């Protein structure tokens, strides 16, 4: 037993045993070659955003074909209501809708776009959106600033996919108050 625990041959034998164990583990462990993108249901966040926000919340009227909603977060901080909705696009890039009544709006927009530099404008269904591009992050952004809030569509998706998302945005009605049992 002593010769297996000492010297070069002992080391080589231990290394061989470890590599063989890893090989067996890899052979018997099931491995999936299919893509898995977690899907989230965002209807509750959409309704809560519409209920609590002082501004007109927008949301996609429908999820675009082959897009996967994969994140949704609604936050209320210092009186500001912010809703972020993320997607894996059909081309498997990232796109996000973000909207908030955070003040000043420019700070929110600059943070979501990762830049404060406007690069032009884009007409989408008769509405003007400001374009921003941050090359080192490969991030494209469409921005609309209203008097009481800002809407941002951003991500690594190309301009066509971001434009398609912006086209689906529709105002969300305020949900009716829940009657109290009393």
Image (cartoon, helix red, strand yellow):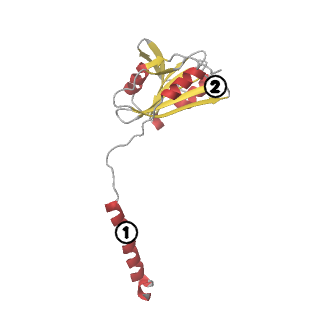
Residue designated by label 2: 80
- The residue at the far top in this view is 126
- Location of residue 38 with respect to 131 vertically, above or below: below
Residue 41 appears anywhere in the view: yes
Q: Is residue 22 left or right of residue 98?
A: left
Picture residue at 59% right of the left edge, 18% below the top: 177
- Judge the density around disc 1: few (<14), some (14-19), many (≥20) Cα neighbours within 10 Å: few
Residue 133 in view (yes/no): no
Q: CA distance from mark 1 to mark 2?
A: 55 Å
Circles 1 and 2: CB atoms closer than 8 Å: no
* SS for dot 1: helix
Q: Position of residue 48 (x, y in %)?
A: 56, 25
- Which dot marks residue 21? 1
- The image quadrant where one finds the C terminus is top right
| Residue 6, position as x, y percentages in the image | 45, 84
Q: Is residue 14 above or below residue 168?
A: below
Q: Position of residue 130 (x, y in %)?
A: 49, 20
User: Would you say 89 lies left or right of 47 here?
Assistant: left
């Amino acid at each position: 037993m002593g010769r297996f625990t000492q010297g070069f041959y002992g080391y080589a034998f231990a290394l061989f045993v470890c590599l063989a164990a890893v090989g067996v583990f890899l052979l018997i462990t099931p491995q999936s070659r299919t893509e898995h993108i977690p899907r989230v249901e965002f209807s509750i966040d959409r309704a809560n955003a519409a209920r609590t926000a002082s501004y007109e919340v927008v949301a996609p009227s429908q999820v675009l074909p082959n897009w996967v909603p994969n994140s949704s977060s609604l936050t209320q901080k210092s009186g500001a209501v912010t809703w972020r909705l993320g997607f894996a696009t059909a081309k498997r890039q990232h796109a996000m809708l973000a909207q908030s009544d955070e003040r000043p709006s420019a700070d929110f927009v600059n943070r979501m776009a990762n830049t404060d530099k406007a690069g032009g404008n884009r007409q989408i269904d008769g509405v003007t959106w400001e374009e921003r591009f941050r090359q080192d992050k490969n991030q494209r952004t469409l921005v609309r600033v209203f008097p009481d809030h800002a809407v941002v569509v951003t991500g690594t998706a190309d301009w066509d996919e971001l434009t398609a998302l912006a086209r689906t945005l529709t105002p969300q009605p305020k949900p009716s108050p829940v009657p109290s049992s009393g």
